Image: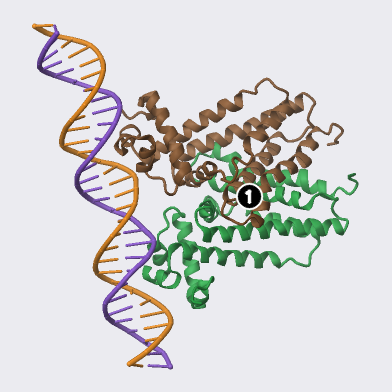
Chain colours: A green, B brown, C purple, D orange
Amino acid sequence: MSTDETPDQSVPDEVHEELMQATYRALCAHGYADLTMQRIADEAGKSKSLLHYHYGTKHELLAAFLAFLLDRFEKRVESTEGNAPDERLEFLLDKMVPEEDEDETYDRFGLALNELRMQAPYVEAYREQFDRNEDVIRQRFADIIRDGIEADIFRDVDAERTASLLFAALDGARLQRVSVATPSADAEANQSARAAPREVRAALDEFVVSNLLRDGGDE
Amino acid sequence: MSTDETPDQSVPDEVHEELMQATYRALCAHGYADLTMQRIADEAGKSKSLLHYHYGTKHELLAAFLAFLLDRFEKRVESTEGNAPDERLEFLLDKMVPEEDEDETYDRFGLALNELRMQAPYVEAYREQFDRNEDVIRQRFADIIRDGIEADIFRDVDAERTASLLFAALDGARLQRVSVATPSADAEANQSARAAPREVRAALDEFVVSNLLRDGGDE
DNA sequence: ACTCACTAACTGACTGGTCAGTCAGCCACT
DNA sequence: AGTGGCTGACTGACCAGTCAGTTAGTGAGT
């Protein structure tokens, strides 16, 4: 029974937190493609061997990191349980597309996370985490929409389908911001891509949200 | 003056085509993360040295490959120049989200391409290609919408903004199909993600396209 | 028609460097 | 004296890029 599915169990809480933070920083600094165990160790001020000692392989460490992230995200989202459907919808939409983070740096972490995501099909341990994550978010959208319909705030649309659209559009927007808008490129070419998240957000409000709220819709 | 910005110029056409095809196959077989010069060479039945001889570095080879792809895509899309705006819109929407390719294999190439895309911020040569590609597609959407508005087929919406939404949503949908729906995962969990592109497509038709076509919309 | 000079396409063997993972052992604390 | 947390030194595999060549073709001079 030593093959526990959650190896993080054995890692002391304090060390675990510290190493997860270090992984976060290392990912931001180097991206996933250039992430090495050594760099994570450096970021934590610990030895590379320690990482192997606690998590076994690199893949297992990263899987633990994804689980760590997911927990945080779910907790943040759950904190709006009580509000009205339309407020919760706006809140979730905002959460998914963070504003332009800082002055000139793009979203290094979001980028690294997507690098990881692209490895999910090759790495079972990653895939589990991402699948769970996407399911949770899409479900949450669908739940909110269903609640809104029941409360007669939203029109009677297909909740699953609408949730899929919202999720896909925001995901796509985030992807563009992350992969195109870079500090070094000239402002001209950057402009449209950097604005993409806002544009998409605005278009969603125009086409979807306002459509949901319009109370006189037939069929 | 041997430092030409387009090294492909110097590569014999026949060999170039052959090596690009080999690169395609190698990407499908191994993904970008596990792509090596040797594997491409093997796929082409040539030596690894030849790749360096013609393209210099790995990055330059991949950049040439992206340019190769982009040209093909643009040619395919341009072939609908004459049709009506609503037909061209449907055509482009379909082109961007390929149907479930084969029986059980997911879109290996689409996945590899997104791996590459996530490297764009780190690799100038990749970024140029992807930026160009995304600009072309978004512009095409916007052009079609503008044409439709002028021809009084579409409502008078913000063309740029609507194009951004379409592009982002489809991009997101493709991403999900590519990164989540895998052959090995159990059917249950797969179902929603595998269906995502169709769902998104349907939702776009419901919220955006039908909204565009509705001729009685105010403001 | 036959060398000779030159070149482009191409190759095999090699190098320098990187990195995940291992292992033997150290240090507290109990 | 034993155990858990931790480390430095090491290894084996892998890989991009290099280099000194080989081969085939082309064209010029005789």
Q: Nearer the viewer, residue B25 or B201?
A: B25
Q: Where B19 sits versus B189, above or below?
A: above
Relative side of B201 to A34, left or right: right
Q: Chain of mark 1?
A: A
Q: In the image, what residue occupies the spot 77% across and 43% down?
A: A207
Q: Nearer the viewer, residue A92 or A56?
A: A56
* Image coordinates for residue A38, horizontal then vertical, percent: 37, 63
Q: In the image, what residue occupies the spot 71% across and 50% down?
A: A164
User: Label 1: how many residues lie within 10 Å, few (<14), some (14-19) or many (20+)?
Assistant: many
Q: In the image, what residue occupies the spot 35% across and 25% down?
A: B10
Quarter occupied by the C terminus of chain A: top right
- Asked whether residue A184 is in view, the answer is no
Q: Where B54 sits versus B120, above or below?
A: above
Q: Nearer the viewer, residue B57 or A107?
A: B57
* Image coordinates for residue B87, horizontal then vertical, percent: 72, 27
Q: Where A109 sits versus B144, above or below?
A: below
* Direction front: furthest residue: B103
Relative side of C6 to A53, left or right: left
Amino acid at the residue labelled 1: Asp
* Image coordinates for residue B94, horizontal then vertical, percent: 66, 35
At mark 1, the secondary structure is helix
Q: Quadrant of residue B13?
A: top left
Which residue position holds label 1? Answer: A171
* Image coordinates for residue A189, horizontal then vertical, percent: 55, 37
